[in-house]
Amino acid sequence: MSPLSSAPWVMLASVCYLGTVTLGTLSAAGRRVGRAWHTRLFVVTVVLTLIAAVLSFSVQWMRAAVLLLALVPLAVLPFVTAPVRVHLRRHMLLGLSAAPCYATALVMLILGPR
């Protein structure tokens, strides 16, 4: 595995996305989770997803396209759902709309390049 392999980046981005969703869910459920942590993890998720997409182009362009597609709802999320307290349902649905992209990217990673 070369140092620029996309596999660990895809897994990191997916785990980070799952963590972001988990923190957001805990926050929406009334747990005392700092919004700053959710925001920081969201930014890390976007950056890791972008890195995974760029590194995937040389191996499997479809996986790269799926990861770039995941970035679309994440890119508009802060603008379309502000303030989150008012638009909580919209925020959750838009944020979760990236989940199939991450799941597809992981399946493509497991199945390998075809």
Image (spheres, rainbow, N blue to C red):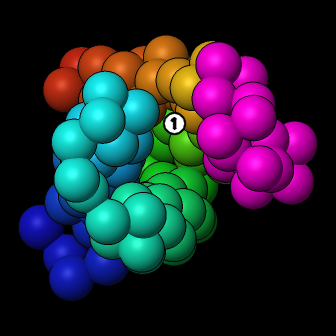
- The reply to whether the magenta stretch includes residue 113 is no
- Compared with 21, 90 (above or below) is above
Range covered by the magenta-colored residues: 72-91
Does the image show residue 20? yes
Residue 46 position in % (x across, y down): 54, 62
- Viewer-proximal residue, 80 or 68? 80
In-image side of 92 versus 13 (left or right): right
The quadrant the C terminus occupies is top left
- Compared with 84, 93 (above or below) is above
- Compared with 31, 104 (above or below) is above
Which of the 4 image quarters holds residue 2?
bottom left
Residue 62 position in % (x across, y down): 60, 32
Residue drawn 22% across the image and 42% down it: 31
Does the image show residue 41? no
Which of the 4 image quarters holds residue 67?
top right
Q: Which residue is mark 1?
A: 63
- Viewer-proximal residue, 18 or 83? 83
Q: Name the residue furthest left.
A: 1
In-image side of 56 versus 34 (left or right): right
Residue drawn 86% across the image and 54% down it: 79
In-image side of 53 versus 82 (left or right): left
Residue drawn 28% across the image and 46% down it: 23
The quadrant the N terminus occupies is bottom left
Which of the 4 image quarters holds residue 14?
top left
Amino acid type shown at disc 1: Arg
Residue 88 position in % (x across, y down): 63, 29
